[in-house]
Structure formats: C-alpha cells, structure tokens
Amino acid sequence: MKHFILSLSLITLAISATAQRFEIPYSGTTAIADYIYELPRNVLPADFDVNTHAIQHGSIILPIERSVDIFGSETFISIMDITTDRRGRVVIPTVSIVRGQATDYPKRTYAEITHKTGGRWARNPRRRQLDYVGGEWTKTNFIRVPDEDNVNSGFVKYEGPGWESDKVGYRFYLDWRNATDIFGKKTPEMSLHRAGVDPRESYHEMQDWGMDILKVGNAVGVGGFAFWTGERAYRMEIYDSLISQVTADGKLRSQVKTYYHGWDHNNSRTNKVDRLTSLISIDAGSRASYQQLLLSHPIDNICTGIVKDPDGEYFEHINESGEWSYIATFGKQALNDPADYKLNLGMAVLFRTGNLREVTSDNNNWVVVLNPENLFLDYYYLGAWELEPNGIKTKDDFINYLNELTKTLR
C-alpha cells in the first residue's frame, strides 16, 4: 500500500559505514508522502536480517519491516517521501541498506487482541446469557472465541480486534455481527491500548485521544464483508468457530488475521464454507485498511459496503477505464459527545473495477457485490473524521482525496 504524511527530518541513528545503495522503486508521476515500498530482493545483502538492518537516506534512518500476505508470501517494506523538483518532476530517492536499527522512528501503527483472564463465566439472568465476571485485561494477540462468548459479554476488549494508524482506528466485532467500526482519533499517537479499559465502554464518550464515531447497528459498518442474498447483506451470523490473531504490530504496518470456520453464508447448511481467511492490514500515514479474503472453495456474491446514515450523502465513482473504483458517503454522520451535535465523517470502500458484480443497497447498507478471482478477493475501506489532525472537512475535499488515493493503490 502507498499512503500519506510525516516529516522524516528528526529520525537519526549512528550506523556502520558498510552500505548497499539502490533507487526507490517508484513509477508514479506525482509527489507522495509516506510511500510504503517493497525492497527488491536483489538489493538485500547476503547477511540481511530485519532486526539488524535499516534504510539510510542522508542522515535519516528508516525502519525495515517483514510483511506476510494472506498466501504466506514474505516481503520486506520501508517508507519514504517522494518529492518533486521545481519543475514538478518526481525525484526518485537513492537510499542505502545499512547495519543498524531505526530505534528513534515513532510507532505509527498498532494492533491488539485483548481479553479478560483470571475470571469466570456466570449466567446473567437479565440478559439470558453468560457474561465474563472478574479477571484482568491481557493483551494476548490471539484468541479462539469461546463458545460461551456473546455480544457484550465483557470478555473481549471492545468486542474484537483493534488496529490503527496515526490517522484513524478500527475494530471489528468478533461475533455473529462481523461488522467494522471506526475510532476517530484527535492525535497521531497510538491510542487503542487505552480504549475500553476503565470504564469498559468509555470509548463511547469523547476522550483526549478520540472516540468510537460510527453507529453500526444491523449494518456491515464500513468495509465489513457479508454475503449478498439478492435482498440483503447477510453477515457472519451462523458459523462453527472463529480464531483471530495479530500477525504484525509494527511501526510501519500492523495486521490482524482471522479464520472463520463453517460460515453458513446463505442460511442453509448446504452452503457452508469450510474456511474463510481474512487478513486486514494498515500502514503508517494511511486512513485505509487493506482487506484480503481467501476462500476454501468458490462462492459468488461476496459483498461489502457502508452503513446507511440519513445524514450521510452517498456517491460513487465506477472507473471503467481504471483499476480502482469506489462507493462513499460524506456528511454529519459521526457520533459525538454531546450526542446532539454530529460531526463530519467520510467513509469509502475502494475495490478493483474488474471484481465488480453490482452496486446495490438494502435497508441498512450501501452495498457493492464483488466476484472473487481464484478464491481470492481484496479491497480497501476507510473513515475520514473532521477532528483528526488536518482532518477532511468538506465533501469536495473528500472526493479529491479519494480520487488521488485510487492513483496510489496497488
């Protein structure tokens, strides 16, 4: 993924004199901040180790991180600002791989799975379900969802995995809802480790870092996946088991991988999917979450979308001649504290035009139905809140942002 913004001028570290130089692989024609790129295999030194090597650009030292996609393919990534000269021509930086570590580079992404340990399950007669009582929050970064767990049981912190960049945060519900929610951030600092701890649902009220800004209800939220029945987006309502883990918690990229076993995707056990694997990635400087899905066998009508809000204006851009298209909404659809004054929020799902089956809707969602290729599907989704640092405040600015973003996705 390629994304946007942080000054590199303050990152320094002493390094050895031995270095292998190469030119950043970039074929674009415009400047871009926070460009995440893969290191070509032929530039990696024979003794390369991600823990002992870094990127040097002038006096600046930048991290190298290992990344693994949903197929298990390994790559190594770093970050760079791509600038232009006085004539507007792109300047391709030349950098070096050196021995050292970018210990002073700030952590710009984060992911967690945190749940209670040391407590017990107890029946709640009022809610007619089991709740988790007592115990302490433990950041395990791995969970097989217990059979006893249910909505608002108090077992999983903010009810699922959380991930964030220095722009925005997200979570998805690790239960039958399987919807994606947005945490608006007022600070670039990593914040989700503080969310939902004391009191447990404090993120529903404005905090110094931000708050939960999206009312999901019966929708997919933003970018949650489902099955299009022809009438509605059918979420992960019936399944056998869920296993989720944080597979990366880096300065540049964080990832959450989830295995859905036995998804009954069309309310009929004859339509049961043996396994669906999800990998969500977020990069430094980016608002966008990158969603990869891998199926165990073919099914049609995978869909995603955006929750319908009466205060959110819907629009779309189907780019017949380009690789990426999108559906989006913008307006005063962000939850707020006080609740009677809503804030501007833009939401979008960006998808490969070649995967598009149809754009439609149901009572709760704006929907895009997509066709997987060779059991695989990928797309992006994002939220842009007006209170984030240098936040987007108008629909026109949001459209301009999305149109520029589609030029940088790969």
Image: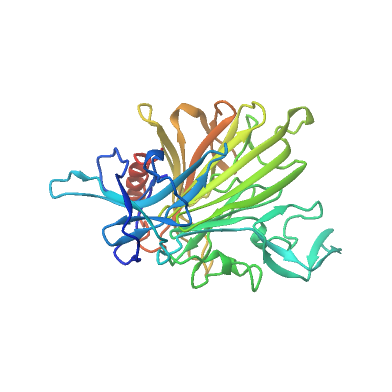
Report the front residue among 135 and 133.
135
Q: Residue 269: give x, y in percent of width and height.
A: 79, 31
Q: How many marks?
A: 0
Judging from the image, the colouring scheme is: rainbow
Q: Residue 355: give x, y in percent of width and height.
A: 49, 28
Occupied quadrant, residue 6:
bottom left
Report the quarter where the C terminus lies: top left
Residue visible at 45% across and 46% down in the picture:
76
Occupied quadrant, residue 392:
bottom left
Occupied quadrant, residue 141:
bottom right
Residue 225 relative to residue 269: left or right: left
Residue visible at 57% across and 66% down in the picture:
193
Q: Residue 231: give x, y in percent of width and height.
A: 63, 32
Report the front residue among 350 and 39.
39
- Against 153, residue 259 (above or below) is above
The answer to whether one can see residue 186 in this image is yes
Report the front residue among 400 and 103.
103
The answer to whether one can see residue 6 in this image is no
Report the quarter where the N terminus lies: top left
Q: Residue 45: give x, y in percent of width and height.
A: 40, 46
> Furthest residue to the left?
87
